[in-house]
Amino acid sequence: MKTAILSEHSRQFEQLRFAYPVVSRRSRGLSLGLNVNPDKVCNFDCPYCQVDRTVPPRDAKVDFDVMLSEIDGLMALAASGAIWQHPKFTSTPEHLQRLNDVAFAGDGEPTTYARLGDAIREVHKLRLSTSCPTSRSSC
């Protein structure tokens, strides 16, 4: 079964600058992405890269506190189940309506981000503090 929600992987969601949600075939549920390379600078030339470097970046660098606030807000939307009411996600099959992971990705190679270790630690703390509803199979 091919569902449109599984092929829409935009790194833009509402007015957020660094965090974005996608329903992923690979993770079999909701994947929250963090764009730790908004400047689109990358020293790799990966053949599968889909970043459009002809369009100027919105942000030249990551605002760490804003990024954490955005991912915390998306985790809260997922934990409450409210994210599935958003027009982008209303067609998500019920078996995919769970938060499965947080991915550090975006417009470049995430391992080049100088504060990646800090970001991983802080997102892990946020994830541990996010309560999941019992009505969902997983969060």
Image (cartoon, rainbow, N blue to C red):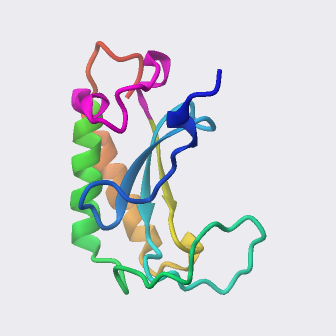
Query: Most extreme residue toward the right, as rendered?
Result: 47
The number of numbered discs placed on residues in the rendered structure image is 0
Quarter in which the N terminus is drawn: top right
Left or right: 130, with 96 as reference point: left
Specify the segment rendered in magenta.
80-99
The residue lying at 78 percent from left, 70 percent from top is 47
Left or right: 14, with 45 as reference point: left
Which quadrant of the structure image shows residue 88?
top left
The reply to whether the magenta stretch includes residue 83 is yes
The residue lying at 28 percent from left, 73 percent from top is 64
Quarter in which the C terminus is drawn: top left
- The image shows residue 66 at horizontal and vertical percentages of 22, 68
Q: In terms of depth relative to the viewer, which is nearer, 29 or 124?
A: 29
Image position of 77 with respect to 67: above or below = above
The residue lying at 38 percent from left, 65 percent from top is 119
The residue lying at 35 percent from left, 55 percent from top is 123
The reply to whether the magenta stretch includes residue 117 is no
- The image shows residue 90 at horizontal and vertical percentages of 34, 27
Which quadrant of the structure image shows residue 138?
top left
- The image shows residue 49 at horizontal and vertical percentages of 68, 68
Q: In terms of depth relative to the viewer, which is nearer, 92 or 61?
A: 92
Left or right: 43, with 60 as reference point: right
Which quadrant of the structure image shows residue 77?
top left
Image position of 65 with respect to 22: above or below = below
- The image shows residue 54 at horizontal and vertical percentages of 55, 84
